[in-house]
Image (cartoon, coloured by chain):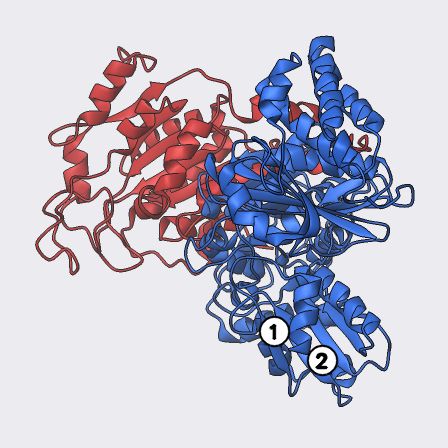
Chain colours: A blue, B red
Amino acid sequence: MEVNIRVAGAAGQGVETTGDLLVEAFAGMGIHVFSTQSYMSRIRGGINWYDVRIADEELFSGREKAEVLVALTPEALEWLRGEVAEGGLILFNGSDGAGVVGIEFEKVAKEVGGSAIMGNVVAGAAVLTALGYEVGPLEEQLRERFGKKGEAVVEGNVKCARKGAELAWEQVGKVKGPPGGGAPRGICSGNEAVGLAAATAGVKFVSSYPMTPSTGVFTFLAKVADEYGIVVEQAEDEIAAVNMVCGATYAGVPAMTTTSGGGFALMVEGVSLAGMLELPAFIFLGQRPGPATGLPTRTGQQDLKFALNAGHGEFPRAIYAPGTPEQAYDLTRRGLETAHKFQTPVILMSDQFLADVRKNCAGLDTSYRPIDRHLLENPPADYVRYAVTEDGVSPRAAPGSGAFVVVDSDEHTEDGHMTEDLEARVRLQDKRMRKLEGMRAEALPPEWYGPEGAEEVLVAWGSTYGPCREAVDRLNADGGSAAMVHFAQVWPLEAEAVRETLGKGRRVTVVEGNATGQFASVLREVGALGECELMLRYDGRPFTGEEIARRMRS
Amino acid sequence: MREKHFFDRDVAWCPGCGNFAILKTFDKALEAAGIDRKKLVLVSGIGQAAKLPHYTQANVFNGLHGRALPAAVGIKLANHELEVVITSGDGDMYGEGGNHFLHNVRRNVGVKAFVHNNQVYGLTKGQASPTSEMGFVTKVQTHGVLSPPFNPLAVAIVEDCSFVARSFAGDMEHLEEMMVAALQHKGGFALLDILQPCPTFNKQNTFKWYRDRVRRIDDSHDPFDRAKALELASKWADEIPIGIVYRHERPSFESLLPVLKQGALVGSRAERPGAAF
């Protein structure tokens, strides 16, 4: 049992506020919720929408159609009414019409003594009521949220909620919401999960230049900076951001930067620097469609090969690509651990879809558990930074700890000083590259979802986890034999195991948010994949489970 | 282990390079300023000046061309108990790193930038630098430089840099005095522009050319006088003032960060409360 609610209007009208209000209300009632956002790159106007999907079981993907449309403008109504499911309900911010229930949200809010902005509460309460829920929990939520702003604001909001409920009374029963109680009450977005994991893992320095869709991680860390003791600085450009991170990590502080494709392009020389200096630089890369400025507020998975090859020269790196907010949390921590253990750059790849997803998350640990920095406390007097070791990892000390710590972007000898001794060059390059073996041995194996003997396998990486997972369930419920193999770590890869899994005469389809099948190409390059089909999407919108299932059958 | 003197390393500078005098003076200034080399980080980018950290003894971060400043800022904010000194050139600091220069004078993090300014690119063999004079002919600027030179001192003063000085590699006594003053400066970012002849690639601004023009700023100058400072910074053709041109009292960036009041970031590993989440 499930319902998809779509709140749509112009930028600046409170689409996000209404959507958030509903997400929090549903989660507060223990209902499974999964929300996605579709917005234009503008601060005012246009058509933005916010989907809140609810169900009596865990959700992993958005939907194409909606059972409830809340249209805040005539344009939103016109644009989206065709995507309302049969028998669905349309609440319109205007007068009644054919198949449309008119409630003038802002006007109603003002009539009961609230402000125009409280129209969001009228709309939220109307939706809850129409679906058959009490508005009591929403009132509690409003008291909690606006308590600090004084009794008048709280009362205004509560009155708006009651009025919204009253106006939707006649709609009760048209679309029925799922029962609550079973789902975790906490909610988390993909971006919040990354920020929380970084703060709890002991990241102490963050330097970024704002860029959609990565900015949410940056602002989250700024919000908790004083609490967790983090210095957060907005750099003059991405080049400064990554070089500041290199400086901070050299000095012994776990540090990270957040960016999207264009900003990451500016950082690339710094990524190579971190590889050469063997610094644990951690980069959050929130993808959006390119090339160039592309579609700034849309989603895509088009920077995999870029991230994989970013930086001149050759050096080891790890790339993680979470599929859910929970994975984003776990992999941020794991990524920081890998960066510090192997002293090399690590990239965490997300995208606009995952960045903005909000869903119930059970028990993300908010306690402070700093990761091991793998730093020498008392380096010996004859310490050299780049001692050649079997596994390629040299004991790391920070400046000020008693030893001289010398690092150089030129090729260098073990003591860190620049050299043109070509034997030293080979010795040090081999040392750096040996770290990749250790990293490969620790690489996360892909996750299998579905029956072991499935005849059809969907290969997913990063944020396509949810839509593919739902597609597997849909296909199997329909009598199919499908499974998913999801890569939450896309580099380095353990090719052998993957080849064995995929090479059993199954139909393999790689599902990716790009136009060229980048991950399929990477899998082929390492010899992990033979024949396969590609299912690609690059219009800036995320896959949905129903879309993937449909395309598998077409 | 290597001695702290530089002559035992294979030095890449040309004979007669002003960098030798700067390095020798720098070593003396560190002693005079009482700097603990174990707590000193020399940060550089790329260029001939940027090689200096390899020829003395300290912690070293020799990073990317133009990026010494952001790296130095990252280091200082990670551990503000370290003394962080940038040794850079005119191309590294004012050209490739120009945006960082503009914004870090504003930011006022307590790092000291010693810029070896020889008005030419040495490492890439003689092209114009941002401080080259108009008409300076090179293999690239075949009709001579067409843009007026960047004035780093004036830009720093306009942005209220907390310490702005200039010296000359040919006056080691003065240079040492300026280096010590910059090292002892506590109010944030310090810029020391060091005029330096390049005998190989700059035949125009020679040792003699500089020596005939540099004039020590006398005691009557009040470095807190912004208008006078700008006037001094604008002099060039016949007379080049050297000395502390400008000072401005303002809090350093790190002193404004509440998080750093509890101590250096690098040491802050204590338990923190969970986020209200």
Residue A176 circle label: none
Disc 2 to disc 1, C-alpha distance: 22 Å
Q: Label 2 lies in what chain? A: A
Element type at marker 1?
A: strand
The foreground one among A554 and A241 is A554
Q: What residue type is labelled 2?
A: Ala
From the top left corner, tell me how far across and down residue A314 is, in percent.
54, 70
Instruction: Locate residue B76 relative to residue A486 in the image: left or right.
Output: left
The foreground one among A203 and A494 is A494
Q: Mark 1 points at which residue?
A: A535
From the top left corner, tell me how far across and down residue A232 is, in percent.
60, 34
The mark lying in front, picked from 2 and 1, is 1
Q: How crowded is mark 1: few (under 14 residues within 10 Å), some or many (20 or more)?
A: some
Element type at marker 2?
A: helix
Q: Name the residue under label 2.
A: A495
- Picture quarter containing residue B243? top left
| Residue B15 versus residue A445 in the image, above or below | above
| Residue A425 versus residue B272 in the image, above or below | below
Q: Residue drawn at (12%, 53%), measured in percent from left and top?
A: B137
Please report contact status of discs 2 and 1: CB closer than 8 Å, yes or no.
no
From the top left corner, tell me how far across and down residue A352 is, in percent.
59, 51
From the top left corner, tell me how far across and down residue B105 is, in percent.
40, 30
**Number of residue marks:** 2
Instruction: Locate residue A142 relative to residue A48 in the image: left or right.
Output: right
The N terminus of chain B: image quadrant: bottom right
The C terminus of chain B: image quadrant: top right
The foreground one among A296 and A435 is A296
Q: Which amino acid does label 1 sit on?
A: Met
Q: Say which label, 2 or 1, has the lower sequence index.
A: 2
- Picture quarter containing residue A227? top right
